[in-house]
Amino acid sequence: MLYTNGTQFPVWPGTGVQVVTNSSAGAVSAALAASATGDHIILPATNQTWTGGVSVTQSGRVIRGMGTNSTVITLDGSQTGFTDSGSFNTYSKFQFTGDGVTDEADGFLVTGGFARISNVYLRELLVAVYFEAPGLLNHSVIADCWRSHRVIFGSSFYDSYYPQSL
């Protein structure tokens, strides 16, 4: 178990791996619906545009790409990539980028239990991460996000993230 700021982050044994054939929002949502606590959802190396976000109500899932320059998800319009109302979910190794036109999308909205966002590249978004619930942001890069508060912490903390301008 990983203890962070008094919060106990359970480590569940993975009971399965869901490998999505593409990283569309619909494919990720379907993999989440078919997953169980402790499962890993693997996003392929691809460039994908989402026209709608993914709502994560499940708990104890790991959503992982193949690397921040290999799994690139462009958020089209004003939406949120992942809205997490579950508990103890982990997101890692992918990139969220704005569409280059409106740049009004948000990367993450965490409203549930504890969420960990690690090794994620967030660029050209309005807000990279909005924590309304406890969470951890670590080893991630935030570049050219337009709001003065790139990461909004309601009741969260971060280990390390690296704000940059390209």
Image: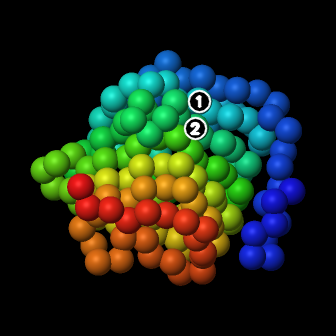
- What amino acid is at disc 2? Arg
Quadrant for the N terminus, please: bottom right
Chain-order first, disc 2 or disc 1: 1
Query: Amino acid type of disc 1?
Result: Ile
**Residue 88 visible:** yes
Q: Which residue is mark 1?
A: 42
Outermost residue toward the top in this view: 21
Image quadrant in which you'd find residue 137: bottom right
Asked if residue 84 can be seen in this view, the reply is no
Q: Position of residue 123 (x, y in %)?
A: 31, 53
**In-image side of 47 versus 88 (left or right):** left
State the residue position of label 2. Answer: 64
- Residue at the limit of the structure toward the bottom, as seen here: 154
Image quarter of residue 17: top right
Question: On residue 132, which mark appears?
Answer: none
User: Tags 2 and 1 in contact by the CB under 8 Å rule?
Assistant: yes
Q: Position of residue 159 (x, y in %)?
A: 61, 68
Query: Left or right: 162 with respect to 78?
Result: right
Element at label 2:
strand
Rendering coords of residue 140 (x, y %):
49, 55
Q: How is the image coloured?
A: rainbow
- Looking at the rendered structure, the number of numbered marks drawn on it comes to 2
Residue at 30%, 35% in the rendered image = 49
Question: In the displayed structure, does residue 86 sit left or right of residue 101?
Answer: right
Around disc 1, counting alpha carbons within 10 Å, would you say few (fewer than 14), some (14 to 19), or many (20 or more)?
many
The residue at the far left in this view is 101
Secondary structure category for the residue under label 1: strand
Vertical placement of residue 4 versus 64, above or below: below
Q: CA distance from mark 2 to mark 1?
A: 5 Å
